[in-house]
Amino acid sequence: MDIINWKKIFSSKIAAIEFSICDRNFVLKEIAEHYPDDRVYFWNQGYKYLQWFTENRLEVLPDYVISSEAEALELTSSLDGVLVVEGLGQIESNKSLTYKLENLYFDSLSRTKLILADCLISIPDSLYSIIPKVKVKLPNVSEIQNFLSTEKHSNRDCTQYIGLSYGEIKLLNQRQMSENDILAYKTAKLAAKGLRITPAPDVESIGGLDLLMRDLNKIRKLFHPTAYERGLRPPKGCLLWGLPGTGKSLTAKMLSRILKVPLISCNWNELISSSLSKSLQNIDLVFQLVDSIGACVIFFDEFEKAFFGWNSGSAGGVMAKQAGYLLSWMQDHTSPSIMVATINRLDMLPPELIRRFEYVWFFDINLHNGAMYEVLKVHLNLHFPGFYEQFKDEDWYRIFSQYRSCSPDELGKAVRRVHDEIFYQNLHIDLTVEILIEYLIKERQNFKPAVSDRKISDALAKIRRTADFARPVQGKDRSRFASPPIRLYQEKKSSLPEGYTPAI
């Protein structure tokens, strides 16, 4: 089982291989197998002497003392075999190293194949044609199953190892770790990179957003094999645009539930490190994980903060490279995964990035009566099962008039606080519909909707001016609570008594 794409690098004089640190022995072993007539040498800055890979381990060669990367590269003119040098990741930023590699490639006396190894290798444009690069990717489910069979662990559940490298799988098996221990290890590893597996939502549906639910169900159908046979595919990216509390995060959770795939939440700020190479390495790990899982939803919350200042100054240059890395993945990845991102301000994203999102939805705070009914129904059924069906239409209209301009999040929190208060006063024991409605009306007097804040209302007005760019999430109110249309010049009936004559 080859973990390296040898077709791309076998015949090249200099090549680059990216791999996880735990996979080093697997990589060296595979190199030795593909060059059986040559010695395989290894060096990085942690070694004083050159190392020789033999019998699946490294042995010291005391005749070769190496103190720098330049000295290691010069050995290509005196050694016969394959020299693996680890730790030359940032070639692009080192002009001297760039020219040295160029000279080695054209040196006819060099008898050694040179392999550059690191977690992330940045090759300058001038060397692309002479230094091919391959990556040892995280194994998918079938590859894990084959690997466990060769390691005589075929009785283990292969799905628990998704997201781990070959070296990590071997190490965890050697330690005889239980499924819970493996899960704890993966959780800690993901958390260190700003990732976590998000649990399913605590509600059964997204209330009031009928057009959005139609789109989500359409996306689910695009995962069906019949869709692939017709040349159709699911979207690679979905953008959820609107103010906080409008249901954007819940939508990401609901999409994962509808598709029956895991939801991986990613904090972009935790992926960003002090160095560009480390940041790109973290981002690369995320996308490797997503591709190894296969069908999943990767979720970025408040995504625009990741690109603040992307088009200005040195920080903007770093942001531009990160955006470019993300753009490449969104365009090229073939795994059935969907990237979902929430934003409050669309203008903070690079325009070329916005175009990569095939679905852009706008979440407005202004809910009509039917939408409010659906949202409240979901939360009332969660906290007070069986009660909302007993509400009369006039009760609903009272609630609608009180909760006008409240966001879906504010509606849900209000119902929860009512539950807290009713439980605190022990009213839940003999709760009636009248008491519940009374406390719902009373709770509305305890807070102001966020949209009543001047800054938020101004931000919402600014968003609405460009909202035509996005898809709406709710359609016209077709419920029994829909307000009748009012004509502009409709004749109004006078409320004055018949025959009344005003005083002159």
Image: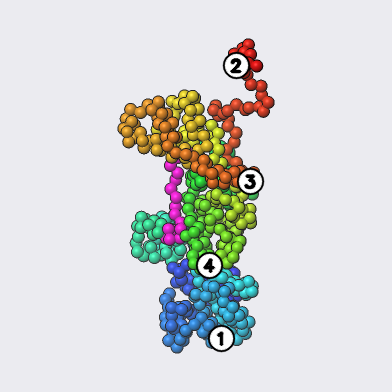
Tell me which amino acid carries mark 1: Ser
Circle 2/circle 3 CB separation < 8 Å: no
Residue 466 badge: 3
Give the residue type that dot 3 points to: Thr
Q: Is residue 367 visible?
A: yes
In-front residue for pair 400/343: 400
Q: Which mark is residue 415?
A: none
Which residue position is annotated with label 1? 77
Distance between mark 2 and mark 4 Cα atoms: 76 Å
The residue pinned by badge 2 equals 496
Q: Could you say whether the residue bearing mark 2 is in a helix, strand or loop? A: loop
- Residue at horizontal 60 percent and vertical 63 percent from the top: 312
202 part of magenta stretch: yes
Alpha carbons under labels 2 and 1: distance apart: 107 Å
Q: Neighbour class for label 3 at 10 Å: few (<14), some, many (≥20)?
A: few
Magenta segment boundaries in residue numbering: 189-205
Closer mark to the observer between disc 2 and disc 1: 2
Residue drawn at x 61%, y 61% is 311
Measure the alpha-carbon separation of dots 2 and 3.
45 Å
Under circle 3, the secondary element is loop
The reply to whether callout 1 and callout 3 are in contact (CB within 8 Å) is no
Which one is earlier in the sequence, the residue at label 2 or at label 1? 1
Membership of 314 in magenta stretch: no
Circle 4 packing at 10 Å, graded few (<14), some (14-19), many (20+), is: some
Q: Residue at x 63, y 53 (%)?
A: 355
